[in-house]
Amino acid sequence: MSILSLIGREKELFIDDINTHEQQLSEIVSSSSFLVIGGAGSIGQAVTKEIFKRNPRKLHVVDISENNMVELVRDIRSSFGYIDGDFQTFALDIGSVEYDAFIKSDGNYDYVLNLSALKHVRSEKDPFTLMRMIDVNIFNTDKTLRQSVENGTKKYFCVSTDKAANPVNMMGASKRIMEMFLMRRSREITISTARFANVAFSDGSLLHGFNQRIQKRQPIVAPNDIKRYFVTPKESGELCLMSCIFGENRDIFFPKLSEALHLITFADIAVKYLENLGYKPYLCENEDEARELSKTLPDQGQWPCLFTPSDTTGEKDFEEFFTDNETLDMERFQNLGVIKNDPVYDETKLNRFTETIDQMKADKQWTKDHVVELFFEMIPGFGHKETGKYLDGKM
């Protein structure tokens, strides 16, 4: 059973747009050089493969995860083989001096794509991981942007998130603030970005966790009241590449809502997933029952499931790719919408944000409340609600 059928679809979302622009896409990629930052994550791997199969002149991939990078190379060699151009991977931390030395040694790329991110809502549970999220999502982005400007890069692409539209959690808010930093740099370099839905079965996602639970003979747990849009890893790569190559300055690409892209609950996907493996879901009342039954039920063709309402901090009731006050171009592509942006940002706010975070780091002391307060200053109307409950406190 394909990922498409598990998320309730039959057709790939962007296939018409890809086919329409394939010749131009291939010509541009094959004559260009690329740096993919965060290229060993699920979206990063998908983007890297979309670039690789179009035979670029140079493709360098950077990621902090050495193991995922090894798998990326194995995957590419097994699927596509080799290219004539320069393909290399580097296991580097983007915030490190080693990365800066790497950029200084070459740094000549037509396109820089930044896919690195702390993407989990659960990353806001403690003030220390929250600060790292700010570093990765905001300051590393601005740093690599500055380096791209200095090296004469033609285009800088960075992933945002649907959760940046009217954010209710710190992850989405960090990406919204990142977009403000992007707008400032857009006066010096052409930038584009993308907001899209959950990437089905991406590393660390709940759906990816289904695979882990089956392998370890553990219960399947999912919220039954949260509906989300899903794209496949391949679609995430196509969306990013289309935005990178065809996006005009400050454009944000997103999937158009249609009958093909519809909301589905995690619990519904879990049921389809189990049925595909030949199991009937058995609904349990609590965690203890689910853990106990996981020892016996699978041998009887059933799998223990715990489907409950969500009550954790940062969960958004619904998903949206754009807000009421954003200007849209819905005509240029068949299945891709584009948000058009002017370089709107508040220089004073951006400087205050940077200075305040720098001071917190210098003091080596900060609280989550202090960071949340700063986010409220940056985003009027930020809908953050603290429930005191986090995903790490659940099975």
Image (cartoon, rainbow, N blue to C red):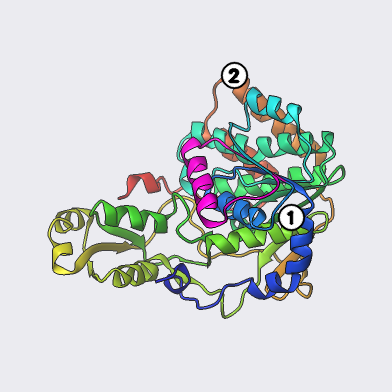
Magenta stretch holds residue 65? yes
Residue at the extreme right of the image, as rendered: 187
Q: Tell me which residue sits at (56%, 74%) in the image.
A: 261
Closest to the observer, 158 or 329:
158
Residue 363's label in the rendered image is 2
Is there CB contact under 8 Å for labels 2 and 1?
A: no
Q: Which residue is mark 1?
A: 244
Q: Can you give x and y, in whole percent of width and height, for residue 103 in the image?
A: 72, 30
Q: The magenta stretch spans which residues?
A: 58-85
Which quadrant holds residue 220? Answer: bottom left
Q: With respect to residue 148, does 237 lie above or below?
A: below
Amino acid carrying label 2: it is Asp
Q: Tell me which residue sits at (28%, 57%) in the image.
A: 214
Q: Can you give x and y, in whole percent of width and height, for residue 181 in the image?
A: 75, 42
For label 2, the SS is helix
Q: Report, in whole angstroms, how far the alpha carbon at label 2 lies from the one at label 1.
A: 39 Å
Q: Is residue 112 left or right of residue 228?
A: right
Q: Tell me which residue sits at (26%, 63%) in the image.
A: 305
For label 1, the SS is helix
Magenta stretch holds residue 291? no
